[in-house]
């Protein structure tokens, strides 16, 4: 938590994920169950929804859909569903965006990727690439249709502006995490190796399964 300019305490992470967990939290309270499970339920619902899109709304052949679905289930995203963190939700939103982009959709992929970028700011580069793909002039379109495509892609990306605007008002910086923690003195070989070997967040436990499924694909 950090103290904002208005004297209120705010999480340094954007509040979008907390808001997404609210329906599950309210449902658990109505059922007199442990509402601390709201994050896990939200993560699971997001991942299952993304898998539904992969399996039944993809333009890929059935075998590829199945392999992609298995890769998702045996990826770190499934493990992070047990954590009250936005990683699984961000993964699910990006997966939906990529599947829809592969299917030829031009503006909805921008929307889903932008939602993911509200919690994971580096995804703004993916949003930019999808925005260009959606707004890029296509042959045969007149000036009005080109302007409409540009407006639709831009509207779909608007949610990426919400976190920096909120943080500018609360902390006078577009990203307090980057301001306080993006420093070269925090870089180390130990932190880098954790991305591979740590059993909670490392890739090593998932590499053998991922390689087998890749070969099957």
Image (cartoon, rainbow, N blue to C red):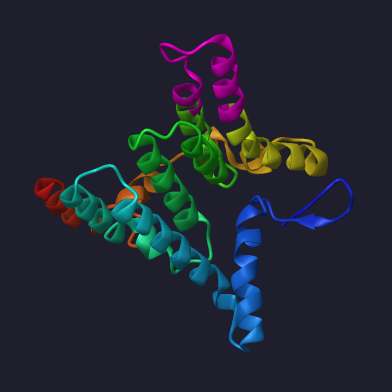
The stretch drawn in magenta includes residue 147: yes
Total number of numbered discs in the rendering: 0
Q: Quadrant of the N terminus?
A: bottom right
- Which residue is at the far left? 216
Q: Depth check: give the residue in front, 206 or 101.
A: 101
Picture coordinates of residue 104, whole percent (x, y): 37, 33
Q: Is residue 153 above or below residue 120?
A: above
Picture coordinates of residue 75, whole percent (x, y): 30, 56
Q: Residue at x 31, y 54 (%)?
A: 56
Picture coordinates of residue 74, whole percent (x, y): 26, 60
- Which residue is at the far right? 6
Q: Residue at x 27, y 56 (%)?
A: 69
Left of 12 or right of it: where is 59?
left
- Which residue is at the far bottom? 32
Can residue 200 be seen here? no
Picture coordinates of residue 183, whole percent (x, y): 57, 35
Q: Residue at x 37, y 64 (%)?
A: 79
Left of 28 or right of it: where is 75?
left
Q: Depth check: give the residue in front, 56 or 20.
A: 56
Can residue 51 be seen here? yes
Q: Depth check: give the residue in front, 208 or 160.
A: 160
Q: Depth check: give the residue in front, 152 or 185.
A: 152
The stretch drawn in magenta includes residue 123: no
Classified by dominant secondary structure, the portion drawn in magenta counts as: helix
In magenta, the rendered stretch is 131-153
């Amino acid at each position: 938590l950090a103290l904002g300019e208005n004297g209120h305490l705010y999480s340094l992470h954007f509040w979008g994920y907390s808001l997404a967990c609210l329906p599950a939290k309210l449902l658990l309270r109505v059922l007199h169950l442990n509402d601390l499970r709201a994050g896990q339920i939200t993560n699971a619902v997001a991942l299952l929804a993304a898998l539904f899109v992969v399996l039944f709304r993809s333009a890929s052949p059935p075998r590829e859909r199945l392999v992609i679905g298995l890769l998702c289930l045996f990826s770190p995203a499934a493990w992070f569903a047990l954590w009250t963190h936005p990683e699984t939700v961000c993964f699910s939103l990006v997966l939906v965006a990529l599947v829809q982009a592969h299917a030829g959709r031009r503006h909805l992929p921008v929307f889903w990727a932008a939602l993911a970028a509200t919690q994971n700011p580096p995804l703004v580069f993916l949003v930019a690439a999808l925005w260009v793909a959606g707004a890029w002039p296509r042959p045969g379109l007149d000036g009005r249709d080109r302007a409409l495509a540009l407006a639709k892609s831009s509207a779909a990306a608007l949610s990426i502006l919400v976190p920096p605007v909120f943080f500018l008002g609360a902390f006078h910086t577009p990203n307090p995490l980057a301001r306080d923690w993006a420093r070269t003195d925090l870089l180390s070989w130990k932190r880098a190796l954790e991305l591979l070997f740590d059993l909670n967040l490392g890739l090593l436990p998932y590499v053998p399964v991922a390689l087998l499924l890749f070969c099957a694909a």
